[in-house]
Image: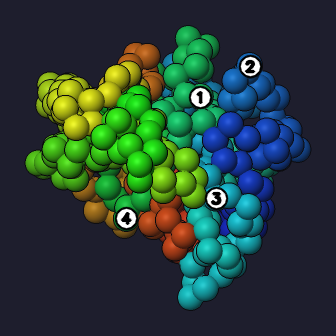
Amino acid sequence: MTRASAAERRRLNEVFAELCAIPSPSGEEAAVGAHVTALLERAGYACSTDAHGNVFTRYAPPAGTDPAVAPDRRSVLLCAHLDTVPHGTTPIEPVLVDDGWENRHDAILGADNKAAVAVMLLAAERARNPAHPPAPVDLELLFTVREETALAGAKAFDVSQLRSPFGYVFDHATPIGEIVMASPTYYRLEAEFRGRAAHAGIRPEDGRSAIVAAARAIAAMRLGRLDDETTANIGWISGGSAGATNVVPDRCAILGETRSLDPAKAEAIVAEMVDHCHDAANEPLCECDLDVTVERLFDGYRHKPSSPAVLAAQRALHACGYTPRPIASGGGADANAFEVAGLHTVCLANGTERNHEPTERVSVAALDGMLDVTYALLDAVAEG
């Protein structure tokens, strides 16, 4: 394996900082998608953008340009997502602090997942750089949108156009070396309680508080980490009228989730959460009408340790001095959507830290390390 040069490492960090500075919350990825497309076209790639905003391109050297080009030449998909979680009006200004990238302001950095986007762009540039040998495999590069909103871009992408038998996403904010071998099934719960408004000081007994009903439902739920495989959370609640304390609130809505590596457990927990909502809505003191919507947003998976994609990842990590560590994750990634669509996809940790938090960061060493891992991964896939 030829490791990244000093010039490539400098460019990697420059590209990463440029990407992070372009706001791209889910649903607003057009600007960063255009920037990625421009960089790829400058390197000689023809890009396509589907109706959803996913950007796709492919690298295959012309036949006869290199002895490595053969009819049975392998192909591999690399995928990263362009969107970030929302950060309001707070800008992202990447700065280096103690050999790591952070946002100068109190908001996310966007290393989730722009660290992976930058690495993929550098791998694409090397593949077409005459100063380097041709890539040992054909490359399919996919940059998805709206990953942070239940993998919407990946779900919408037409995988039938791919030539690769498997792929990789670099999208887990843990130390390099970890390989996600299992990911959860995820349910989203939305409940709206509709009570009866009344004057809180004169006729409170005529009212039915939707907020009280929602609060009782939440208080009855098992939330947090339920076991080694299962979590549940209420992430949002809204009710009443802003600034009004003298009205018994007639509306309250909540959003929640549950996820588990065991699909049956996830189904059981979301059913339990729904039951608690109905029980609370039937309480005489806060009797409410109730609308509940449950949606299964993505399915989980478990990889076999013997899969060629997993074995290639292990070889690449070893080649770069990392110890491969299989993990089960409570998070989802585009890999979940591709697995359901029939494309075997492995999610690799890429060394980012504290994703979705204002203290998000990634070290220069982790950025550089994942570039080396990517180069080694292409070699490992070529070796079969």
Q: Residue at x 22, y 37 (%)?
A: 285
Reading the chain from its start, which is encountered first: label 1 or label 2? 2
With 198 as the anchor, is 109 left or right in this view? right
Q: Position of residue 382 (x, y in %)?
A: 47, 36
Q: Position of residue 225 (x, y in %)?
A: 18, 52
Which quadrant is the C terminus positioned in?
top left
Q: Residue at x 34, y 59 (%)?
A: 177
Q: CA distance from mark 2 to mark 3?
A: 25 Å
With 278 as the anchor, is 351 left or right in this view? right
* 97 relative to 294, above or below: below
The residue closer to the viewer here, 252 or 115, is 252
Q: Amino acid at mark 3?
A: His
Which residue is identified by label 2? 51
Which residue is identified by label 3? 87
Q: CA distance from mark 1 to mark 3?
A: 20 Å
Marks 2/4 in contact by CB < 8 Å: the verdict is: no
